[in-house]
Image (spheres, rainbow, N blue to C red):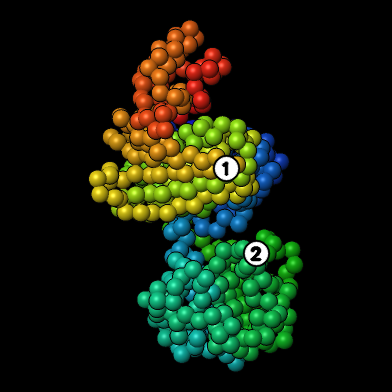
Amino acid sequence: MAFSVRNLLISERVDASCKKILEENGIKVVQRESMTKNELLAEIKDYDGLIIRSGTKVTADVIDTAKNLKIIGRAGTGVDNVDVEASTRNGIIVMNTPNGNTISAAEMTCAMIMCLARQIPQGVASMRGGNWERKKFMGMELFGKTLGIVGLGRIGKEVATRMQSFGMKTIGYDPIIPAEVAATFGVEFLALEHLWPQCDFITVHTPLTPSTRGLLNDETFAKCKKGVKVINCARGGIIDEEALLQAIESGQCGGAGLDVFEEEPPKNLSLVKHPNVVSCPHLGASTHEAQGRCGKDIATQIVDMVKGRSLVGVINAQALSHAMAPETKPWIQLGEALGSVAKACAGQENGKIKAQVTTLGTSLKNAGNCIATAVVVGLLKGDLENHVNLINAPLFAKEAGLIITAKHSDSTPGSPTNMCALEVSTSGVSHKLMGSVQAGIPVLLQLDGAMFGQVVPLKGNLLIYKAVQNPQLLPSVIGVLASAGIQIESYNVSAVLDGEQWSIMSIASLLVDLNPLKPYAKMVTQLAI
């Protein structure tokens, strides 16, 4: 799957290295900062790529307007300012820089913890007011205190290791990271209901999703230790701001460090102005080092994608990562080709499609799911208003009621080392195909149980027909093609099975009308791969 990015819009301030790297690799770059929504809608129409930070809202109407857009690159981690579902539907890659902000965001969190423990900002403000109030700002040591970390990914891990150096006990929860992995960096894994009551400090490091929105709320605060201090340097909305304010005013929460807000900038300043709240204007990634890394990383990732070298940081298309690997790319091409042949053979059959992909061979052990996604592309191509690709194929398959499964088996003795089998059935009709890759080219080995004497390269324009074995058939077909001015480039025929055999011709161009061939064949179809 190739992606051509010729021109790209940067809608926010990013490190100068970003533009430099892109332009050095032949991509035309326009940088326009602080655009309004209407300005973005007018500007985005002609671009192949868009690079943003957290300030640009890439909504569904922006995506629908951007007819040429192939990639949205976030110079940072979270992508909650991007409509990922709309991007996926339109076949657009959403990419972030998973490592660029990690250290800066972790250090910001640690600074918030220390400010809450020792009331440093409040002391600074008092001194600037001409006061000397030593007794007012009595703090607490971090040594021996318990820090609860919700979200144990890159940033959560870095926070844990840093705060352990202060003698803090670190406990945590993550729906993905296993307990044994958390233990490797000194975090005791607990379910949330067991975590809340033990914490002196709680910090959140999750994306903002329906399941994490309002994660800390009235009910959660009631389960916490009285005086617990909370920190959010991740995404506004993970902590319910109204519940937080009530908890601070009641004393249930002893203070908060907030770098992010549900609305940015916040119009309601009740939390910002509260004396027990340390607040900053979303500065977690605002270091020279982080911005330099993020700008460089997103540009390098886009260049590597365009050149087909690698795919890093993709949010919505895991199959693409496999498609970029040189050893897997031809197998992805095989999957799509097999799907296209199966669709052509099925013709106008209606009903729910079921497909089973079986990979054979040790090197394909983990490739089944991405090959299955490629099969879906072949099965749905041309049927949808939107262009189908590896990004949106799973979504469209679900909506079309296409059921596809993948499994793996070891190679059988005497068979090629690696093969891929596809069985597609609909309305009681099924077709079975077997393919492989030879010299980097996808080939067909078998169709509906009939083996081909020589492998059939799955590329170019193919004419496929099934007929009763008849020595006079081939001259008749050649005559029809000659009359239409169609040149034959190659011809393959399968073994005879139940008196019938498959024939596949590679032809210079597709026939305008297949009707002249129908008297000679039980089934005839053509396709371009």
Q: Which residue is mark 2?
A: 210
- Quadrant in which the N terminus appears: top left
Examine the rendered structure and indicate whether residue 88 appears above or below residue 509: below
The answer to whether residue 314 is seen in the rendering is no
x then y, percent, for residue 150 = 53, 74
Q: Residue at x 46, y 17 (%)?
A: 509
Q: Where is residue 506? Give x, y as percent.
A: 40, 22
Q: Which residue is mark 1?
A: 428
Is residue 445 in view? yes
Question: Label 1's element?
Answer: loop
Residue lying at 36% horizontally and 26% vertically, measured from the top left = 493
Q: Residue at x 51, y 58 (%)?
A: 77
In terms of secondary structure, where does tag 2 sit? Answer: loop
- Nearer to the camera, 509 or 217: 509
| Residue 499, x across and y down, in percent | 41, 29
**Which amino acid, by three-letter code, is at mark 2?**
Pro
Rendered image quadrant of residue 419:
top left
Q: Nearer the viewer, residue 428 or 9?
A: 428
Mark sitting earlier along the chain (1/2): 2
**In this view, 203 is above or below 64:** below
- Under mark 1, the amino acid is Gly
Q: Residues within 10 Å of mark 1 (few under 14, many from 20)?
A: few
Q: Does 255 sit left or right of 525 as displayed?
A: right
Q: CA distance from mark 1 to mark 2?
A: 41 Å
Of all residues shown, which one is farthest toward the bottom?
Answer: 135
Q: Residues within 10 Å of mark 2 (few under 14, many from 20)?
A: few
Position of the C terminus, as image quadrant, is top left
Query: Which numbered disc, 1 or 2, marks the residue closer to the eye?
Result: 1
